Image: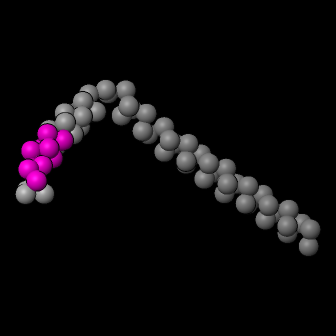
Amino acid sequence: METYGCAPQPDNLAFELHDASIAIPQPSPTTPSQPVPAMLVGLLLALILRFIAIARVFANRGR
């Protein structure tokens, strides 16, 4: 790539990527929303485990 003289282009792209990465962390409202999906996953797991427990109770009654 050096023979064609395209070495400056990746540097420009790198600077643009650095500018983009600097601009991404600025909005702070995105960070508090991260724990919410974790809570939703926990609730889903709890519901699934309760459903399995209830299904086992009904399966044992059927026997």
In the figure, is residue 56 to the left or right of 29? right
Query: What residue do we see at 19% from left, 36% from top?
Result: 16
Residue 47 appears at what percent x and percent y? Answer: 67, 50
Query: Is residue 10 or residue 36 the one in the foreground?
Result: 10
Instruction: Name the image quarter holding residue 17.
Output: top left
Q: Quadrant of the C terminus?
A: bottom right
State the quadrant of the N terminus: bottom left
Number of numbered markers: 0
Is residue 24 found left or right of 16 in the rendered image? Answer: right
Residue sitting at x 7%, y 56% = 2
Q: Toward the viewer: 63 or 11? A: 11
Residue 63 position (above or below residue 9): below
Per the rendered image, the range of residues in magenta is: 4-13
Q: Main secondary structure of the magenta part?
A: helix
Query: Magenta span has 12?
Result: yes
Residue 1 shows in the view:
yes
Image coords of residue 5 (percent x, y)? 8, 50
